Every structure is written in structure tokens, then in C-alpha cells.
Amino acid sequence: MRLYDAHAHLADSRLDPTLETVLDAAAAAGVAGILACAARLEEWETVTAISRRAPVLGALGVHPFFAQTAPADLDSHLRLSLAAHPRLVAVGEIGLDFWDGRDDVALQEAVLNTQLTVAQALHLPVILHNRHSWGDFFKLLHRAGIVDLRGVCHCFSGSREVARAVLDRGLLVSFCGPITYPQARRLREAVAYVPLDRILTETDCPDLPAQAVAPGFSLPQHVGYVLEAIAEIKQLPVSAVAAQVEANYLALFGNGISASR
Ligand SMILES: [Zn+2]
């Protein structure tokens, strides 16, 4: 059985001295693919370096929390940086996050819009982080005239209604550690609702550990707990869920051997 972690912050400084160990442990646990995400510009170089190593693929982007750090030339900088290596296969993580209030709506939207435009131009999928912002996000897509966005809503924690809306737009939904908590009722309802052929698994390493590893760091080697929770909620064999998640992951990100770029 091959496992896939569709969202890991391998450039996080908390993993720095132990990255080798983290990758070895992931391989030993059967993890056949890890998508390393960037949250800030400062992480792009590290993500690029790590993603040169199979089975890691990389995504570059500016997270909404760091919108104010986006450079004026974000558009060209992102295009050039993504061209550095064919294993950089996505733009992320990007989105709108109004958890902390809405002081910087215009800035977050501008930074997101630029990154969506680059993703569309390069035909790359996006890794979306949206919180308290789904309505604004859909409006932005509408204004930008984007009807065919490919990507995944990472660490999905929205309601069934939001799940329905993102599925209607063709996006995938990725679940992480919190679904392993039996009391996470609304979240587990979303897992039950989203069809298996639209689901990815992730750890959001090093945050959001599964119940079995809390309060420690969440690591790619733990993604099996997420897979098992999905299988339990959907009452399907773990192997069947694993096979479909693999197909979903490879369809969205490929295997890093790109002929087109
Ligand atoms: Zn993340």
C-alpha cells in the first residue's frame, strides 16, 4: 500500500536538523509521495531544494498570513521560481484567511489573484488555504473569470455546504489529522460527504497531529492515520481508499517527470 501526504511544510525550521530522518521514516512507513508546500517567500529556496529529491514534489506560494511580505514583482518571481525544476508542480499554499479579522482583505485578494493568474497561465494546480473566507474566495474567482481552477482545498474544515460548493467547482478536498478525533463530528460528516475520487490525504506537517501522535509533531510518516480514519468513516477497506487517493494524487500533481515544462 502506497501512502501520499499532499501537504507538508518540510521547509519549516522546526524540522531543520531532522529532515533526513523525517524522509527516511516516511519511506519506511510506505509514503510514496509528499507535496512540500511553501508559506513564505523565504521558504521557496528550501522547498525547491527538497523537491529535487523523490518522492518529494514542491509547491511555491505566499500564504495569506504573509501577504504583506509578497514582493512587488510576485508575478514574474513566481513564474521564474517555478521554472527552476519540473518537480515544482503546484502553486501554494495560497488563499484568503480572515480568521484574524478583515483588515487586509484588499491585500490578501491582490496577492491571491496574482498567484491564481500564474497558476492558470502555467497550467499548474493550486493548494488552497481558505478560512472564514469561502464567500469572498468564490466571488474573487468569479471576478477573475476563472471557471476551470484545478487544485485542492487543504486541511478542509468547512461545512458540508462549503464542501458541496468546492466540489461543484471541480476542486479536490484534502483531510488531515483532526479527522482522527472522534468528537470532530462536523469534520467527519464532511469526510463522509466528499466522494472518494475527490479526496486527498495530508499531514500539514509539523502541525495538526493525528490523535495517535498528539501532542507531538505531525510528520509525513503519520499520514496513514488519516487514511485509516477515512476508511473507517466511509466503511471501506483501507487498501481501496489508498488506491483511490494514489490515483487522485497522481492525477493532480503527476509524478514529477514532466515533459511539458
Ligand atoms: Zn499548510
Image (cartoon, rainbow, N blue to C red):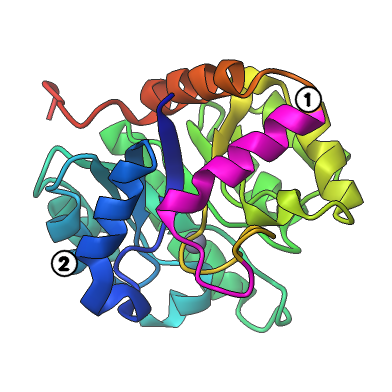
Question: Disc 1 designates what residue?
Answer: 234
Q: Is residue 9 magenta?
A: no
In this rendering, would 37 be left or right of 138?
left
- Residue 57: x and y in percent read 26, 43
**In the rendered image, the vertical position of residue 47 relative to residue 256, given as above or below:** below
**Quick one: 242 or 141, which is closer to the camera?**
242
Label 2 to label 1: alpha-carbon separation: 39 Å
Residue found at x 50% / y 32%:
149
Res 224 seen here: yes
Looking at the rendering, the stretch of residues picked out in magenta corresponds to: 214-233
- Residue 26: x and y in percent read 34, 48
Q: Quadrant of the C terminus?
A: top left
In this rendering, would 232 be left or right of 174?
right
Q: Earlier in the sequence, mark 2 or mark 1?
A: 2
Q: Is residue 232 magenta?
A: yes
- Residue 14: x and y in percent read 36, 80
Amino acid type, residue under disc 1 in the picture: Lys
- Disc 2 or disc 1, which is closer to the eye? 1
Residue found at x 15% / y 26%:
257
Considering the whole magenta stretch, tell me its main secondary structure. helix
Choose top left, top right, bottom left or bottom right for residue 12.
Answer: bottom left
Res 202 seen here: no
Q: Secondary structure at mark 1?
A: helix
- Residue 75: x and y in percent read 27, 58
Disc sitting over residue 45 in the figure? 2
